[in-house]
């Protein structure tokens, strides 16, 4: 299948700023993140496609070359066919774009850092939190008691008993890597790999800690405070750096990824950063006009004016009474949109029926041609 234009992939125009490109990529990456789409190959491909587009467009030099030459790239550059010419892997994406995902690696534990001696990184933890619209409107701090790997207090994370020092690895002599030389049809070739004896640390522990068996971590728990920013939405992920599982041998702590779930609200319907409130008017107020009190997400009420002759389906907009935009996903605050409906009673008293029968004969209650045409147009637009 033909590759899609990178600007099209991220949904930005060719004049988009670096910040716009980053925001667009982050939005797509969250939507198609593997944790949200387990086993979904199509989502995985879109996740990789977006990563490849971001890799080129956020780099000024690569972007200039792409704008000038397209996918072919300048002569000798090999084009933009993806990472190392073979497309991005998940590990490539997570390790290269730590600024996007907020972590220090793939999030599945293991090593972090560059070449040479490796440093263990604790694995990430994943939590779900259900928030009310009121909590979303202001932001909230939640406390969790988290079961996790913690640093061993007996050896203070070193993994060695009684403070004994780790020894230089006899296999790699402290480098953390081993080099192998092999004969091939192209001559002598050297390859480097992580040392199997010390797992890349460069040191080995002879006298292991009796509490953690030399790992430097034990099972424990911690009360963690997590600040959820205002404006978050269903499916967003809030990353809390350094609060995940402890890394072995005083390595780097993993993160906590908090997945947002949103509770339904009995009063408001959320539409992005806007809130929709359905106002049910009685017929006399719709016909004569008046004042109505409208609730807000803050718990207060505001008075609005109902004009005489207000029609069902009319909308009123209260600016800035919606939800704030979460940082990095826009700016400002949404509106409170009041959707007007008119209540028609199912049962009437005799006097009420007589009054309505008299009104029925009045031309005022039959509607003018413009009103009928407007209703017809709305009906036609609905079905088109």
Image (tube, rainbow, N blue to C red):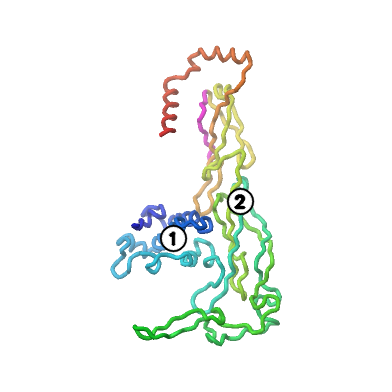
Secondary structure type for disc 2: loop
Q: CA distance from mark 1 to mark 2?
A: 32 Å
Q: Please tell me which residue is depicted at 59% across the width and 71% down the height of the picture.
A: 252
> On the rendered image, what quadrant is the N terminus found in?
bottom left
Secondary structure type for disc 1: helix
Q: Position of residue 119 (x, y in %)?
A: 56, 75
> On the rendered image, what quadrant is the C terminus found in?
top left
Q: Please tell me which residue is depicted at 56% across the width and 82% down the height of the picture.
A: 197
Q: Is residue 152 magenta?
A: no
Instruction: From this view, report whether residue 183 is shown above or below residue 244.
Output: below
Q: Which region is colored magenta?
A: 309-319
Q: Position of residue 202 (x, y in %)?
A: 55, 82
Would you name the residue on which mark 1 appears? 48
Would you name the residue on which mark 2 appears? 139
Q: Position of residue 141 (x, y in %)?
A: 64, 54
**Quick check: 38 left or right of 69?**
right
């Amino acid at each position: 299948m033909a590759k899609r234009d990178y600007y099209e992939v991220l949904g930005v125009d060719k004049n988009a700023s670096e910040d716009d490109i980053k925001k667009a990529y982050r939005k797509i990456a969250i939507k198609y993140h593997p944790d949200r789409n387990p086993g979904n190959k199509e989502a995985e491909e879109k996740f990789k496609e977006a990563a490849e587009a971001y890799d080129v467009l956020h780099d000024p030099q690569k972007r200039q070359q792409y704008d000038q030459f397209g996918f072919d790239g300048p002569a000798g550059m090999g084009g933009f066919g993806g990472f190392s010419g073979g497309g991005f892997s998940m590990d490539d994406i997570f390790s290269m774009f730590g600024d996007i995902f907020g972590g220090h690696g793939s999030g599945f534990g293991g090593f972090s850092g560059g070449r040479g001696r490796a440093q263990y990184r604790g694995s990430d933890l994943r939590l779900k939190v259900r928030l009310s619209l009121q909590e979303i409107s202001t932001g909230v701090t939640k406390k969790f008691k988290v079961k996790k790997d913690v640093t061993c207090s007996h050896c203070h994370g070193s993994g060695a008993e009684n403070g004994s020092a780790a020894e230089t690895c006899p296999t790699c002599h402290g480098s953390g890597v081993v080099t192998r030389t092999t004969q091939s049809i192209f001559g002598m070739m050297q390859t480097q790999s992580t040392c199997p004896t010390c797992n890349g640390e460069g040191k080995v522990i002879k006298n292991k800690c009796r509490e953690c068996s030399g790992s430097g971590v034990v099972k424990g728990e911690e009360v963690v405070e997590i600040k959820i920013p205002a404006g978050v939405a269903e499916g967003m992920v809030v990353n809390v750096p350094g609060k995940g599982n402890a890394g072995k041998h005083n390595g780097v702590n993993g993160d906590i990824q908090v997945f947002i779930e949103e509770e339904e609200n009995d009063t408001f319907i959320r539409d992005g950063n806007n809130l929709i409130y359905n106002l049910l008017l009685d017929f006399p107020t719709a016909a004569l006009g008046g004042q109505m009190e409208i609730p807000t997400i803050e718990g207060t009420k505001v008075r609005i004016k109902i004009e005489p002759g207000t029609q069902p389906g009319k909308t009123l907009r209260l600016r800035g009474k919606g939800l704030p935009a979460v940082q990095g996903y826009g700016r400002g605050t949404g509106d409170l949109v009041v959707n007007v409906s008119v209540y028609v009673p199912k049962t009437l008293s005799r006097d009420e029926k007589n009054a309505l029968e008299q009104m029925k004969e009045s031309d005022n209650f039959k509607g003018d041609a413009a009103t009928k045409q407007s209703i017809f147009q709305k009906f036609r637009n609905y079905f088109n």
